[in-house]
């Protein structure tokens, strides 16, 4: 419904009623006579007549304009213009313009098509407030002379072609996938480094444990040999070591047999083991 259109008031003959937030236009034999305020008014009918009313409420005009950006992308720009008739300028609003909406639309087209081509697509999205301010400034100066006040202008949408939207989404998705892959690779690197550090620390601690275990075994063997030699007469440390090695050898065979493994048994193994232990014992004693 176009509320700026010339509509008749409600009433009969000399009695005319103007609704709230409206102003009536009275003509006397075709010549403008006066403005009627809201409420009941008496006119000299049929010489005088209310030829129309103007709404003083704020109205909105949605304008859609297609233009091209600086980087040759066609976009559809939606602009919402909020305006109203000035009471003191109702004469100009009624008589000077036959199509105020068309006038506003023309100025919006002019501003949009002179502003957007200076910007690239991304810049136009970020400059919606600047575009709206330019439209409002241009309309305010012109439409006030015709009895209209521009309350506000809003750039409600800047919509490029569907293919351009899809390309932008793909670029954004690719960039995000690249960032995600980079973060994932960095996380894998950190995980591997930490695992290597943990493995190195575990091996170091394991080596310390084995070294301490061997040291404790050697010390235990030394203590056992010394005590046995002191308590049993006519025995030498070699005799004690032979007994201990033989005992350890049989313990080893028992452990291996429990795991169902078949090994070749050679009694000379004890002699070889004895020589190895003796060498280790002599090394630790000298240390």
Image (spheres, rainbow, N blue to C red):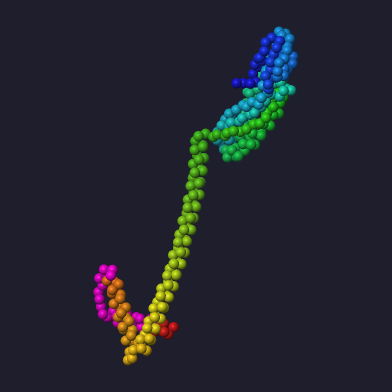
Q: Residue at x 69, y 13 (%)?
A: 16
Whole-percent x, y for residue 133 in the image: 66, 34
Q: Looking at the magenta stretch, what is its main secondary structure? A: helix
Residue 52 falls left or right of residue 212: right
Outermost top residue: 46
Identify the residue shown where x is 69% and y is 27%: 149
Q: Of residues 28 and 257, which is closer to you in this image?
A: 257
Q: Is residue 18 magenta?
A: no
Q: Is residue 34 above or below residue 161?
A: above
Q: Is residue 142 in sight in this rendering?
A: no
Nearest the viewer among 115 and 5 is 5
Q: Which of the 4 image quadrants contains residue 147?
A: top right
The image quarter containing residue 58 is: top right
Residue 277 horizontal/vertical position (percent): 35, 81
Task: State which quarter of the image contains the N terminus.
Answer: top right
Q: Residue at x 51, y 43 (%)?
A: 172
Tell which of 271 and 98 is nearer to you.
271
Q: Position of residue 18 (x, y in %)?
A: 69, 17
Q: Which residues are magenta?
A: 258-281
Residue 29 in the image: x percent, y percent?
72, 9
Would residue 208 be seen by someone viewing this image from the given angle?
Answer: yes
Vertical order, 115 against 32 (above or below): below
């Amino acid at each position: 419904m176009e509320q700026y259109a010339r509509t008749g008031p409600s009433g009969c003959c000399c009695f005319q009623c103007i609704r709230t937030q409206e102003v009536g236009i009275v003509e006397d034999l075709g010549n403008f006579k006066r403005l009627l305020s809201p409420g009941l008014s008496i006119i000299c009918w049929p010489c005088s007549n209310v030829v129309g009313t103007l709404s003083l409420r704020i109205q909105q005009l949605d304008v859609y304009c297609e233009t091209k950006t600086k980087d040759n992308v066609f976009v559809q720009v939606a602009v919402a213009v909020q305006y109203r008739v000035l009471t003191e300028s109702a004469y100009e609003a009624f008589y000077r313009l036959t199509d105020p909406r068309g006038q506003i639309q023309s100025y919006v087209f002019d501003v949009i098509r002179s502003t957007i081509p200076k910007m690239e697509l991304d810049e136009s999205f970020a400059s919606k407030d600047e575009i709206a301010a330019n439209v409002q400034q241009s309309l305010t100066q012109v439409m006030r002379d015709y009895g209209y006040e521009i309350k506000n202008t809003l750039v409600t949408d800047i919509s490029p072609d569907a293919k351009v939207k899809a390309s932008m989404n793909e670029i954004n998705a690719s960039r995000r996938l690249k960032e995600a892959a980079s973060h994932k690779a960095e996380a894998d690197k950190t995980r591997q480094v930490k695992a290597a550090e943990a493995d190195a620390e575990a091996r170091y601690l394991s080596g310390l444990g084995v070294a301490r275990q061997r040291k404790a075994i050697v010390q235990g063997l030394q203590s056992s040999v010394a005590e046995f030699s002191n308590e049993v007469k006519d025995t030498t440390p070699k005799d004690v070591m032979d007994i201990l090695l033989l005992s350890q050898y049989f313990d080893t065979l028992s452990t291996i047999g429990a795991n169902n493994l078949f090994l070749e048994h050679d009694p000379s193994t004890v002699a070889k083991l004895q020589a190895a232990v003796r060498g280790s014992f002599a090394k630790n004693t000298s240390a």
